Image (cartoon, rainbow, N blue to C red):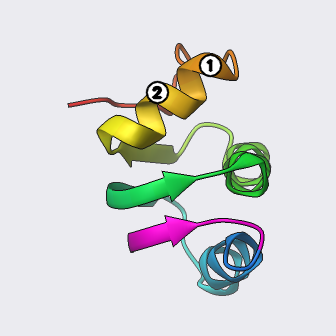
Amino acid sequence: MVVTGEVDMATADTMLQTVLGEPAGRVTLDLRAVTFFDSAAIHAVVRLAGHYPDTLTVLPSRQVSRVLEIAGLGSQPWLHPA
């Protein structure tokens, strides 16, 4: 799934529900075009990581990487920075 723009409290749940609504054994969340990422977005990604414990790949933008680092999630196995 490719996500662009801002992921915040107004859009994070839509992202989460869209991913969960698609039957998939493996999920790649491409966030390289995300310009804003808040705590609701972090929560959505952590929920996805719980739902897809060994099959989630997150490709972050620089901004997303920074936010995840600050949140203490920078070394998660699902995070694949460029």
49 lies left or right of 31: right
Q: CA distance from mark 2 to mark 1?
A: 6 Å
Q: Amino acid at mark 2?
A: Arg
Nearest the viewer among 32 and 6 is: 6
43 lies left or right of 30: right
The C terminus: image quadrant: top left
Nearest the viewer among 23 and 33 is: 33
Nearest the viewer among 78 and 71 is: 71
Residue located 69% across and 44% down the image: 49
Is residue 7 covered in magenta?
yes
The N terminus: image quadrant: bottom left
Which residue matches tag 2? 66
Q: Residues within 10 Å of mark 1 (few under 14, many from 20)?
A: few
Image height of 81 relative to 57, above or below: above
The answer to whether residue 81 shows anywhere in this view is: yes
Which residue matches tag 1? 70
Task: State which quadrant residue 73 falls in.
Answer: top right
